[in-house]
Amino acid sequence: MWIQKEFHILAKPRGFHLITDDILIEIPEIKSIKTGLINVFIKHTSASLTINEDADSTVRLDFESHFNKMVPENQTYYQHTFEGSDDMPAHLKASILGSSIQIPITNGKLNLGTWQGIYLCEHRNHGGNRKLIVTIFGENE
């Protein structure tokens, strides 16, 4: 069985945000999947997705701090600057982290580790709503 849905995540401030529950709300069909895979894809070049710690919010703050240091704004060698000082660094961060994630589905649930959650990584100061495509492939119960 294949399921595919497209939906928006409302605009979030710059930073790393847990969206696991937002995704699960949009795909209640996951409960009927015995064994399968979910692919989550973000249709943007200045935001990304990753999986990491979902229990301690300081991890998300540290991600933001580290990426801002690793990929700084206002570098003299950036040529793509007409959309603001956060634009080119946002593209670089999005490429480093990636535009999709894949997670196993087992007995109607995402088979994530105990402390894992899905992050929307917003790399722009004013990125706007973000469009996600969720594709599920699996066997019904």
Image (spheres, rainbow, N blue to C red):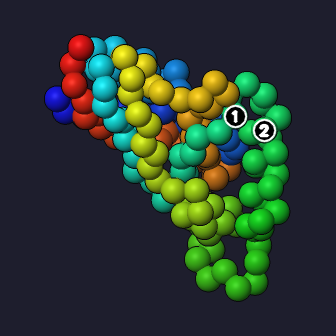
Q: Please give the count of numbered marks on the rendered protein.
A: 2
Q: Position of residue 55 (x, y in %)?
A: 73, 25
Q: Position of residue 92 (x, y in %)?
A: 60, 67
Report the quarter where the C terminus lies. top left
Residue positioned most to the bottom: 77
Label 1 sits on what residue type? Answer: Glu
Choose between 51 and 74: the one closer to the eye.
Answer: 51
Residue 132 visible in rendering: no
Report the quarter where the N terminus lies. top left
For residue 39, above or below residue 107:
below
For residue 81, above or below residue 93:
below
Q: Position of residue 57 (x, y in %)?
A: 78, 30
Choose between 125 and 26: the one closer to the eye.
Answer: 26
Residue at left 73%, top 67%? 71
Q: Which mark is residue 111?
A: none
Quarter of the view holding residue 102: top left
Element class at badge 1: strand
Distance from disc 2 to disc 1, alpha carbons, whole Å, reads: 7 Å
**Is 12 left or right of 134, judged from the image as shown?**
right
Residue for badge 2:
59
| Neighbour tally class for label 2: few under 14, some 14-19, many 20 plus, Cα within 10 Å | some
Quarter of the view holding residue 107: top left
**Is 20 left or right of 5, judged from the image as shown?**
right
Residue positioned most to the left: 1
Residue at left 21%, top 19%? 140
Residue at left 80%, top 55%? 66
Residue for badge 1:
53
